[in-house]
Amino acid sequence: MARPTRKQQFLNALKTAGGRCSNPTLSAELGWDDDIYWRIHTELWEEGKIEKGRGYGGTAILTDIDAQAEPNELEAPRMFQNERELYEPAVRQIQLNWQKGHRLDACHVENVAHQGARETGGNWSRPDIALVALKTFEYLPNRIMEIHTFEVKPHYDVTVKGVMESLTHRQFATRSYVIYYTAGKKLSDFPESSRIEAIASKHGIGVISAKDIEDYNSWEFICLAERTTPDPEEVELFIKRSLGDGTKTQILKWLK
């Protein structure tokens, strides 16, 4: 009997898990490295055989099965007491993990919160973290530049304010997110969780609940961000005003 292909192995493992499984758990079950896992994941998603769902590290879902599964509880992570302490760990996790899970060809992540008194266009006009990425498609001729923005909120500020700040970034971003560091708790444990999810869903803002800001596998995607097409002039202005020289140089290299 012929050995199952990697795609068959992926689908069989997903069926065994009830049709729905977090990407970290499924990858560990298959015993594949990240490159192989995400290549097969992307191919199956493009073929319409799986869907992407929210959950810790993202979730793979069989398109013909609506199985519900609660992710395993994680031990309480190290506590962070200051919002500024969260920026660099979040940058590291995004740089290491975001590209593979979002089908990006290349990406560069920058902490843009520490810009001092630089003029950026008013209140809430600058995100905490910005990701600039390049994306290509098989049947489209042009390379697409993506800008994803992230607001980062500590466990003592899990409020709808984070969603509203992220909403202002859609002026220049293709996707906008707010990351709530929940210090080992679920987002639903916080009083404003329902309002956060309702308003974010209405306006297309991505919501991530991070039990441990230093462990991407603990990041739960509560709401998926909708893609927008911002005015190119606004994108250009954001790049000029808010991004560092290293990021600008990387963008110019991509565009050559």
Image (spheres, grey):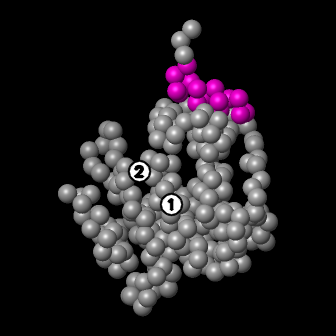
Q: Is residue 200 visible?
A: no
Magenta part of the chain: 4-18
188 vs 62, left or right, is: right
Residue under pointer 1: 94
In-front residue for pair 213/112 = 213
Amino acid type assigned to the residue bearing label 1 in the image: Ile
Query: Mark 1–mark 2 contact, CB under 8 Å?
Result: no
Residue occupying image coordinates x 26% and y 44%:
141
Amino acid type assigned to the residue bearing label 2 in the image: Leu
Where residue 104 is drawn, which disc sits there? 2
Residue 195 on image: x %, y %: 71, 68
Q: Residues within 10 Å of mark 1 (few under 14, many from 20)?
A: many
141 vs 195, left or right, is: left
Q: State the quadrant of the N terminus.
A: top right
Cα separation, mark 1 vs mark 2, equals 12 Å
Residue occupying image coordinates x 39% and y 62%:
108
Instruction: State the SS at label 1.
Output: helix
Residue 35 on image: x %, y %: 47, 41
Residue occupying image coordinates x 68% and y 79%:
81
- Residue 225 vertical position relative to residue 18 in the rendered view, above or below: below
Q: Which residue ends up furthest to the top in the rendered image?
A: 1
